[in-house]
């Protein structure tokens, strides 16, 4: 049963995030700690910076998760939900946990009257592309994804 993540999930959530970092090839740069997640998602001092859903197994061990953040509005004054991460343990794949996590994200997007749900997929991750395509997702031909590494820019400017 998919549920919203709670503070007690933080340690397992970080472990799953680290596995995703290995899979996507940025494990060396991965620097998120349980304290970071607790502060950014579950602190009582400020609003959460993300929303996460988790997929616990029969024994309570987390088998997958999805993380989103919200862009409050764009041109149409409606929110955009950004799916930052969706990951299911390799041993738990084929049990429809990815479907259930994605459905929870879509339901949340609808509940807050979002118009768009956005995410990125690695160019060589054909399985993810099939997964999202089967659920109505499509590559956005109108926009390219761009970024600026401010750490590199700062080093150049010095």
Image (cartoon, rainbow, N blue to C red):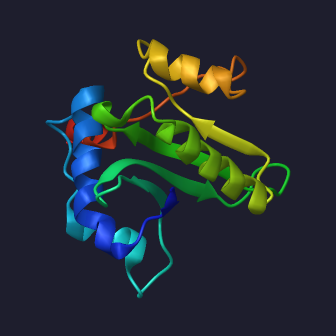
Query: Residue 81, image x and y in percent?
Result: 64, 50
Q: Residue at x 68, y 61 (%)?
A: 72
Query: Residue 73, image x and y in percent?
Result: 74, 57
Query: Residue 84, image x and y in percent?
Result: 48, 44
Vertical relation: 50 (above or below) 83 = below
Left or right of residue 45, residue 77 in this image = right
Q: Residue at x 19, y 40 (%)?
A: 29
Task: Give the camera-side residue of 15 and 122.
Answer: 15
Query: Residue 65, image x and y in percent?
Result: 42, 49
Residue furthest front as drawn:
58
Residue furthest left as drawn:
28
Left or right of residue 152, residue 73 in this image = right
Residue furthest right as drawn:
76
Look at the image and tell me whether residue 134 can be seen.
yes
Left or right of residue 8, residue 72 in this image = right
Q: Residue at x 14, y 36 (%)?
A: 28
Q: Quadrant of residue 156?
A: top left
Left or right of residue 64, residue 17 in this image = left
Q: Residue at x 73, y 21 (%)?
A: 142
């Amino acid at each position: 049963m998919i549920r919203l993540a709670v503070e007690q999930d933080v340690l397992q959530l970080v472990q799953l995030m680290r596995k995703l970092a290995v899979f996507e090839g940025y494990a060396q740069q991965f620097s998120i700690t349980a304290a970071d997640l607790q502060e950014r998602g579950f602190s009582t001092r400020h609003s959460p910076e993300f929303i996460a859903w988790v997929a616990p197994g029969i024994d309570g061990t987390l088998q997958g998760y999805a993380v989103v953040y919200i862009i409050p509005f764009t041109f149409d004054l409606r929110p955009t939900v950004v799916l930052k991460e969706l990951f299911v343990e390799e041993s738990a794949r084929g049990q429809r946990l990815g479907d259930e996590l994605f459905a929870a994200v879509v339901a949340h997007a609808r509940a807050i009257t979002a118009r768009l749900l956005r995410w990125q997929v690695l160019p060589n991750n054909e399985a993810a592309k099939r997964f999202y395509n089967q659920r109505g997702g499509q590559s956005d031909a109108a926009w390219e994804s761009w970024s600026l590494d401010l750490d590199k820019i700062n080093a150049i400017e010095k």
